[in-house]
Each structure stands twice: as structure tokens, then as C-alpha cells.
Image (spheres, rainbow, N blue to C red):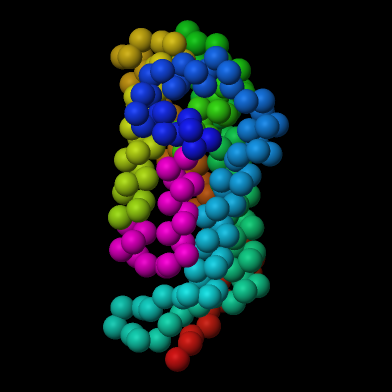
Amino acid sequence: MLSHFWGLLTEPDNEWISIRKNPPGLIQLYLGQIIWLAALPAICAYIGTTMVGWSLPGSTNVVRLTPESALWMSILAWMAMICGVAVISWFIQWMSNSFNSDPTLTDCTAFTCYTAYPLFLIGICGLYPSIWLAIIAATVAVSATAYLLYSGLHVFMKIPKEQGFIYASSVLCIGLVVLVSIMITTVIFWGMGIGPEYVQVY
């Protein structure tokens, strides 16, 4: 994974071709990479919100989550990220016919996984909950993901660059829809009582 990611940053065209020629198996992708990448932000957020905590503006008190509520939220976030990768991968394959491409679901899952790598990696910032750190890290990660998406999709799918731009924009829209769906699901779970429980540390 790390070697592929470094190659995508230095020689993206050659690396995407290499990944397309020798993609990992679908089960290998999920069991060997995706579930662990999705676990990184979930685990870091659990540690940061239960052991480190954060201070609200204008207050010196440290706020933390109870271990039980943080555990449930971390598990649900982990599952949401795995489902998000699966849904986006399926949509990429579903749209491929419109752009005269014929990738397998495994190909599309590999592309989604490697493209979303920066978004998984910023999960490390969850160890220190801070709104400014989150904003900066998210900006960098989203920029890197957008770069990988727009620069690599046409190469990976073997289509003209002009079509790749439209294809990538469509994938980006789907990603936003998935994000909104996750937010709506979160609100529903909170309404069911599975939500954050705060503890103030004086």
C-alpha cells in the first residue's frame, strides 16, 4: 500500500497502469487493506476523545467522551467507511459503461482504496482533537485525494483525458452523496440513543 501510494505521488501514470495490470483480489483488498485503513481513524478518534479530550472556546475545562459512547461511535464510523468504499466502487463500475470502459469490481475497489488513502491517513490527527488541526489536515487530504482522482481515473480506466474529467467529477458527486447519507444516518442513530456522552474534566 505505501509503495503504491508513493508511486502515485511521484509517477502516477505508471503506478496506475501497474495497479490495473496486477490488482489485488477483492477479498485481499478488504481483509488486507481496507478494514485496517478504516480502523486507523476510528481507533485514533477513540483514543483522542476518551484520553486526550478537547476544550471548548472560552473554557479551560477539558471535555471527553465516555469510553462506551466513544466505542460505539468508533465502530459505526469504521463500518461507515468500509460501506462508503464499497458503494463508491460499485458506482464507479456502474458508470464505466457510459465511458466505454470495462473494469471489474475489483479494479474499481482498488482504485477507490488507493485514491482515498489520504483520507484514511489523516485519521492519525484524531489522537489530538482540535478543530484547527482537523481543518488543515482535511484540506490537505481532500486536495491529495482530488489530485489522485482527477489525474488517475482516465489512466486507470483507459479512456481519453476529457472523458476522465467528467467521469471523475461524477465520482466526486457520488462521494459527496455518500458523505451526506452517512451524516443523515448518524443523526438517526443519535435519535435512537447511540450518540456521544460527554464528561468534563476540571
- The residue lying toward the viewer, choosing from 202 and 174, is 202
Taking 10 as reference, is 71 above or below it? below
Which secondary structure is most common in the magenta stretch?
A: helix
Q: In this view, does 182 lie to the left or right of 133?
A: right
Residue 172 in the image: state x and y as whole percent: 40, 33
Who is closer to the viewer here, 160 or 31? 31
Which residue is farthest front?
3
Q: Position of residue 72 (x, y in %)?
A: 64, 64
The answer to whether residue 65 is above or below residue 83 is: below
Q: Which residue is drawn at 45% across and 21% down?
A: 16
Work out whether 139 lies above or below 172: below
Q: Is residue 184 above or below residue 1?
A: below
Residue range in magenta is: 117-135
x, y percent for residue 117: 47, 40
Residue 80 visible, this orientation? no
Q: Where is residue 128 in the image (x, y as percent from the top left)?
A: 43, 67
**Which quadrant: the C terminus?**
bottom left
- Image side of residue 9 versus residue 32, left or right: left
What residue is drawn where x is 29% and y is 83%?
A: 58
Q: Residue at x 70, y 31 (%)?
A: 27
Q: Is residue 136 on the magenta stretch?
A: no
Is residue 123 inside the magenta stretch? yes
Q: Residue at x 61, y 39 (%)?
A: 33
Residue 42 in view of the camera? yes
- How many marks are shown on the rendered structure? 0
